[in-house]
Amino acid sequence: MTTTPPDRWERVDGSTVACTESIKVLSENWTELETHLQESFDDAVLLGVSKADFKAKMHALVESLTCDFKELTAPPNQED
């Protein structure tokens, strides 16, 4: 399985993250996470875990993530 990173990343105000370097980092992170999740999923199934249970637990993991950083809005005068 290989998915393409999202074409657009949004800020909390709905504006688009446009910095090339930021998009590069987000895309690299996407690819690394996808690879690691796929390997973990395969391992779990080979070890006897049901596919549905693994996916449910991964969804719960994502939902439990927290971040203490303030969400950013678009810089002044940035056009999307």
Image (tube, rainbow, N blue to C red):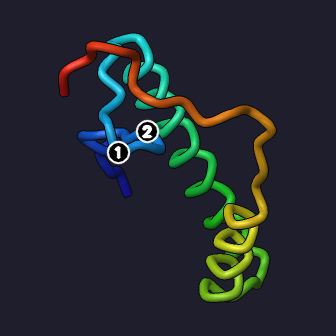
Label 1 SS: loop
Of residues 75 and 2, which is closer to you in this image?
75
List x then y, in percent, for residue 57.
74, 76
**Above or below, comparing residue 73 to residue 13 in the picture:** above
Of residues 66 and 80, which is closer to you in this image?
80
For label 2, count other residues whose C-alpha is less than 10 Å away and answer few (under 14), some (14-19) or many (20+): few
**Above or below, comparing residue 8 to residue 50 in the picture:** above
Three-letter code for the amino acid on which mark 2 is drawn: Arg
Three-letter code for the amino acid on which mark 1 is drawn: Gly
Of residues 79 and 35, which is closer to you in this image?
79
- Choose top left, top right, bottom left or bottom right for residue 59: bottom right
Q: Does 8 sit left or right of 58 as displayed? A: left
- The residue that mark 2 highlights is 11
The circle drawn on residue 53 is none
Furthest toward the left, the residue is 80
Please report contact status of discs 2 and 1: CB closer than 8 Å, yes or no. yes
User: Looking at the image, which residue is at 19% across and 27% down?
Assistant: 80
Q: Does 41 sit left or right of 14 as displayed? A: right
List x then y, in percent, for residue 78.
26, 17
The CA span between labels 2 and 1 is 5 Å
**Above or below, comparing residue 57 to residue 26 in the picture:** below
Label 2 SS: loop
- Choose top left, top right, bottom left or bottom right for residue 58: bottom right
- The residue that mark 1 highlights is 14
Placement of the N terminus among the 4 image quadrants: bottom left
For label 1, count other residues whose C-alpha is less than 10 Å away and answer few (under 14), some (14-19) or many (20+): few
User: Looking at the image, which residue is at 78% across and 51% down?
Assistant: 66
User: Looking at the image, which residue is at 61% across and 84% down?
Assistant: 51
List x then y, in percent, for residue 43.
70, 64
Q: How many marks?
A: 2
